[in-house]
């Protein structure tokens, strides 16, 4: 808990510094003040409302026990085993099998799974997946992951907001070069933030999912289905790269790109091997 609180504070501090310096590049001291103000507002917004932002972005529908007894019962059963408050439960109108957790703390947490996940998984596999998400809630990963999602999206839009200045005098040329450098480094910085937060925490959440569900094989089987589904069933246009680290598997793994260089998740085969060790 303390470790994640420290990392959350450090992340916010670094991002406020980044926004302040970017503002300084474009507008000297006045720009720095604007950058600081934007980052401060984003920090407050991230803490109080980022979960609502993610839920709204993916058009999640909250469900109660009467709406989906199967899903609600499994979440309640797992929450009791994990000794956690009952989180809010949502369904994402997507056919790709996937799930995520969000919220600022266990008392204000939510879990969401796609329609495709409910259709594809057995009850035991669903327990493994939702146990993984409750592991994130128990480890308090959800706050730092949602804050990272907000800032990652903001960082990738820095250049769109400010543009790149060009001009003849030396000062304008210097600003232009710095802006170009930021335009290259900002998206990379956003991905590094996501990777730093995600990879080790995924293994810990997998272990928690195995524990809460009662059998590591449940999550092992689910992960294989999730991997295949993410490669063959596309997410629709509401999917946002800035939030991909929040899902149990990368929703964009079916897209060709730079391979493992910017992976926000460990390889699924490595996660399955780690769970297999728990079985032994």
Image (cartoon, helix red, strand yellow):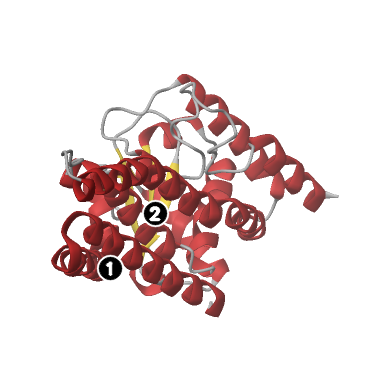
The reply to whether residue 60 is visible in this rendering is no
In the rendered image, residue 213, in percent from the top left (x then y), is placed at 61, 55
The extreme bottom residue here reads 2
Name the foreground residue: 250 vs 93: 250
Q: Earlier in the sequence, mark 1 or mark 2?
A: 1
Q: Along the horizontal axis of the image, is 78 left or right of 244?
A: right
Work out how far the residue at label 1 is from the one at label 2, CA to CA, in angstroms.
32 Å
User: How many numbered marks are there?
Assistant: 2
Name the foreground residue: 134 vs 47: 47
Residue, disc 1: 43
In the rendered image, residue 130, in percent from the top left (x then y), is placed at 50, 51
Name the foreground residue: 3 vs 163: 163
The reply to whether residue 155 is visible in this rendering is yes
In the rendered image, residue 252, in percent from the top left (x then y), is placed at 44, 31
Q: Quadrant of residue 11?
A: bottom left
Q: Is residue 122 above or below residue 56?
A: above
**Residue drawn 70% across the image and 49% down it:** 216
Name the foreground residue: 194 vs 74: 194
> Given contact means CB atoms under 8 Å apart, are the residues at marks 1 and 2 in contact?
no
**Residue drawn 41% across the image and 31% down it:** 116
**Residue drawn 32% across the image and 41% down it:** 183
**Residue drawn 65% across the image and 43% down it:** 218
Residue, disc 2: 72
Q: Quadrant of residue 273?
A: top right
Q: Crowding at label 1, few (<14), some or many (≥20) Cα neighbours within 10 Å? A: many
SS class, disc 1: helix
In the rendered image, residue 277, in percent from the top left (x then y), is placed at 81, 49
Q: Is residue 274 above or below residue 168?
A: below
The extreme right residue here reads 280
């Amino acid at each position: 808990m303390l470790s994640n609180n420290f990392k959350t504070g450090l992340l916010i501090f670094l991002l406020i510094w980044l926004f302040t310096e970017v503002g300084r590049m474009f507008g000297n001291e006045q720009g720095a003040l604007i950058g600081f103000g934007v980052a401060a507002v984003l920090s407050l917004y991230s803490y109080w409302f980022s979960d609502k932002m993610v839920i709204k972005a993916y058009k999640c529908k909250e469900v109660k026990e009467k709406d989906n007894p199967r899903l609600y019962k499994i979440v309640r059963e797992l929450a009791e085993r994990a000794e956690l408050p009952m989180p809010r439960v949502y369904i994402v109108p997507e056919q790709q099998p996937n799930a995520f957790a969000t919220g600022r703390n266990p008392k204000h947490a939510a879990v969401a799974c796609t329609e495709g996940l409910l259709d594809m998984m057995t009850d035991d596999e669903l327990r493994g997946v939702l146990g993984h998400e409750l592991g994130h809630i128990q480890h308090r990963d959800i706050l730092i992951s949602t804050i990272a999602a907000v800032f990652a999206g903001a960082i990738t839009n820095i250049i769109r907001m400010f543009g790149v200045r060009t001009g003849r005098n030396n000062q304008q040329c210097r600003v232009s070069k710095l802006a170009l450098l930021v335009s290259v480094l900002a998206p990379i910085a956003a991905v590094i933030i996501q990777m730093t937060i995600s990879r080790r925490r995924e293994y810990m959440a997998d272990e928690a999912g195995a524990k809460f569900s009662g059998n590591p094989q449940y999550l092992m089987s689910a992960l294989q289905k999730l991997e295949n589904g993410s490669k063959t069933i596309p997410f629709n246009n509401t999917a946002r790269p800035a939030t991909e680290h929040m899902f149990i598997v990368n929703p964009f793994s079916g897209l060709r790109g730079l391979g493992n260089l910017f992976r926000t998740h460990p390889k699924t085969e490595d996660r399955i091997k780690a769970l297999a060790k728990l079985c032994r």
